[in-house]
Image: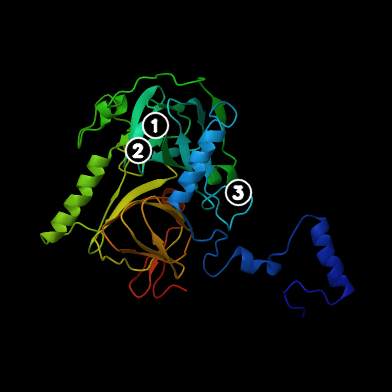
């Protein structure tokens, strides 16, 4: 009996394999290892992008490449070396550094893909989402859910850079993308301290009776740093007082939520913020699904697939599916994280494995 390894030792079998190709078919027995590995084998690789290098590229681009129709945004995608020919950070997530010069305006457009912006430093830019100007400041998470018109304008002479996160790879893989041009500038060039969405929604525990229906994405356009910072500080203070409040000893974390459902801020992207006390070391974790992190403040070490990387303010790193990772804080370490967890969980593929401690996907130790 011929082994199922794809080798042909007879004219008949050789002809059969040739006919498979001619009929645009492929037998499972020659590709089972690739299609159904024992554990995830991502093509994406764990990788660290250095903020100083990204900012240098963005600044040089600002001097040479104008913002306007066509390219639309002065955004530089972080291209994972394991995904050649793309500008994808992971197979489902796109991350870029965007740069807007003094008094520049990025014209409005909209697209099916969900997007957010996270600001690691600077201020002076307003993102206008469906006509609502939203100030962008250090530590803020700004949402642009799919099919919302949006543009940006810089009200100052100083340039500003931030990271964008989108579900572009997932949308492209599933062929769900639409795109439409909007205003040549932005529909409202005002620069208010507080956006209309915040005036309506940013009141803890209070929901307007005018908007009781569940929304696919959060209606709050801006999650401000002062609230994130206070929540993390209080978690650690409660831990000091002996009360349960942190994810693990010395590790405070929050998840940004959709105020109408309590779920994730957008249907395809989860956003979190983590703070580690100086000296904290997290357990090694394997997780199904991929994530991208940015260091907001502090210095430390991330171990990705057994390799240590020193990281500091602004550095961005990708964690592909099932690649083991852990964090160590040399000093107090703040990190923003986004992931494809809403997709993974909705489809029932979620699984976490902490060696020797926890395996959410099966009894016993994961392979």
The disc at residue 204 is none
Residue 275 horizontal/vertical position (percent): 27, 55
> Tag 1's secondary structure?
loop
Q: CA distance from mark 2 to mark 3?
A: 29 Å
Rendered image quadrant of residue 348: bottom left
Residue under circle 2? 122
Q: CA distance from mark 1 to mark 2?
A: 9 Å
Closer to the camera in the image, 64 or 247: 64
Rendered image quadrant of residue 362: bottom left
Observer-side mark, 2 or 3, equals 2
The disc at residue 158 is 1
Q: Residue furthest bottom?
A: 1
Residue 353 horizontal/vertical position (percent): 39, 67
- Tell me if I can see residue 221 in this picture: no
- Tell whether 223 sits left or right of 314: left
Residue under circle 3? 86
Instruction: Give yes or no for contact between labels 2 and 3 (Cβ–Cβ under 8 Å).
Output: no
> Tag 2's secondary structure?
loop
């Amino acid at each position: 009996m011929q082994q199922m390894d794809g080798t042909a030792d007879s004219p008949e079998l050789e002809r059969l394999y040739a006919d498979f190709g001619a009929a645009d078919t492929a037998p499972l027995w020659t590709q089972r290892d690739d299609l159904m590995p024992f554990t995830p084998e991502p093509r994406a690789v764990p990788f660290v992008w250095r903020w100083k290098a990204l900012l240098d590229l963005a600044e040089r681009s600002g001097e040479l490449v104008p913002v306007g129709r066509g390219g639309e945004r002065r955004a530089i995608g972080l291209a994972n070396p394991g995904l050649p020919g793309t500008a994808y950070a992971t197979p489902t997530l796109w991350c870029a550094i965007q740069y807007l010069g003094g008094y520049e305006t990025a014209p409005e457009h909209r697209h099916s893909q969900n997007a957010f912006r996270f600001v690691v430093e600077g201020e002076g830019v307003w993102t206008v989402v469906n006509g609502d100007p939203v100030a962008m400041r250090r530590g803020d998470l700004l949402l642009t859910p799919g099919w919302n018109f949006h543009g940006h304008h810089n009200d100052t002479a100083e340039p500003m850079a931030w990271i964008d996160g989108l579900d572009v790879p997932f949308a492209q893989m599933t062929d769900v993308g639409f795109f439409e041009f909007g205003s040549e500038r932005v529909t409202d060039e005002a620069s208010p301290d507080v956006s209309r969405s915040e005036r309506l929604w940013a009141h803890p525990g209070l929901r307007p009776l005018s908007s009781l229906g569940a929304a696919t994405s959060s209606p709050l356009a801006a999650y401000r740093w002062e609230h994130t910072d206070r929540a993390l500080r209080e978690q650690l203070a409660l831990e000091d007082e002996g009360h349960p409040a942190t994810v693990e000893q010395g590790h405070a974390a929050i998840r940004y939520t959709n105020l109408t459902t309590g779920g994730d801020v957008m249907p395809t992207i989860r956003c979190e913020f983590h703070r580690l006390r100086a000296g904290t070391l997290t357990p090694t974790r394997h997780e199904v699904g991929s994530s991208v992190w940015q260091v907001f403040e502090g210095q430390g070490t991330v171990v990705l697939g057994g390799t240590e990387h020193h990281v500091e303010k602004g550095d961005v790193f990708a964690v592909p599916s099932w690649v083991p990772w852990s964090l160590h804080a040399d000093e107090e370490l703040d990190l923003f994280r986004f992931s494809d967890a809403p997709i993974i969980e909705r489809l029932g593929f979620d699984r976490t494995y902490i060696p020797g401690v926890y395996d959410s996907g099966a009894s016993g130790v994961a392979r």
